Amino acid sequence: MDSRPEFYKAARKHWLAYGLYALLALAGLLTSIWATWLNVSSAWAVDGLSSAHDASSPTSIPSLPVYAPAQSETSLSRQANIYTVFPVRPRVDVVRYTVQTGDSVFGIAGEFNLKPETLLMGNYSVLNDNPHLLRPGQELNILPLDGAYYEWKDGDRISMVANRFHVEVQDIVDWVGNDLDPVNPQIDPGTWITIPDGTRALTLWLIPTIARGSAGVGGALGPGGCYGDYSGGAVGTGGFIWPSSSHEIVGNNYWSGHLAIDIAVGIGEAVWASDTGVVVFSGWSYGGYGNVVMIDHGNGWLTLYAHLNGVAVGCGQNVYRGQTIAWGGSTGNSSGPHLHFETRSGGGFVNPMYVLP
Ligand SMILES: [Zn+2]
């Protein structure tokens, strides 16, 4: 390592110390000369450094403070800081971000220290509450803090909007980024307003849960819908395995706008039944899931596999844990190959990470 900067600092410190020392000596000398010139004391030492004042000085002369040479270690310890320190202020403005290849709503939100829901609520016109509609090149609004972003409409009142997003009027008025007059807040229609901590229900883009006994309803969900009554088929073990050799989450993890995990499964890679059960949907679905397999495990649990390149099983078929049921792909609303995997229980959604080994 090069120690030269340290050496120079030390050298400069010493020179400064000597400089101060010389200045003080000169000051002492001048004081002495001045005193001598005034002829109030002929007895003062001329060297100025032996500052202790002479015992033979007249008592009418006020005594000068005792001169103590500066200690370089203590008097000159402060060094110049070559770096300018900028105060860190929180961002208040909405900034724009261009989506890159490989981005996810979940990932971008994390980059900006925001919840993924905030990204959806700030970009309804682009994403339509659907994280799978994210595409490279899209321009997104990045709010300065978690909350909602709202375009003011004709006839809106702040109390109405606050109520709609579950916040107080003051939360909207006080937010500096909104630049409102606190005494008489006026918002023109068309103005975009940040609503700190504002929330609203997200539109969820889901395939409804299909029970094996009522698979007939699946027909409305796409050509992959099943029509039979498959009561009495194979029943799950109650224990799930990963549906692929990959255990890597790519893009979206589980959150309120994405009730699934996206697993890094390439096009054509095998997708396995996570547990034993009956196929209640197999094939193309409407609504952005692409090719889908849904398995009813007969014990209250159901698993769903989406964006598949192709399916290997048909309606009503018994499938067994670990059996290949499909191949990975990027069909439907998908920005790249991955397996969208859901685990549902009693009609509700469970984070697959809670049930996978
Ligand atoms: Zn997904």
Image (cartoon, helix red, strand yellow):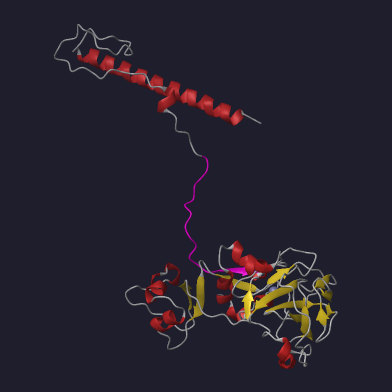
> Magenta segment: does it hold 94?
yes
Residue at 74% from the left image edge and 73% from the top image edge: 237
Residue at 67% from the left image edge and 84% from the top image edge: 209
Asked where in the image residue 61 lies, by quadrant, the reply is top left
Viewer-proximal residue among 20 and 79: 79
Give the answer, above or below, for where 339 lies relative to 203. Answer: above
Residue 201: % across, % down? 53, 80
Q: Is residue 221 visible?
A: no
Residue found at the very far front of the displayed protein: 232
Asked where in the image residue 142 lies, by quadrant, the reply is bottom right
Please give left or right for residue 259 compared with residue 171 in the image.
right
Residue found at the very far left of the displayed protein: 60
Residue 117: % across, % down? 57, 73
Viewer-proximal residue among 54 and 107: 107
Give the quadrant of ligand 1. Answer: bottom right
Residue at 58% from the left image edge and 79% from the top image edge: 124
Q: Which residues are magenta?
A: 82-98
Give the answer, above or below, for where 163 lies relative to 220. Answer: above
Majority secondary structure in the magenta region: loop
Q: In the rendered view of the protein, which quadrant contains the C terminus?
A: bottom right
Residue 87: % across, % down? 47, 52
Asked where in the image residue 277 lies, by quadrant, the reply is bottom right
Give the answer, above or below, for where 20 lies relative to 153. Answer: above
Q: In the rendered view of the protein, which quadrant contains the N terminus?
A: top right
Q: Is residue 36 visible?
A: yes
Please give left or right for residue 348 compared with residue 296 in the image.
left
Viewer-proximal residue among 16 and 300: 300
Give the answer, above or below, for where 15 lies relative to 114. Answer: above
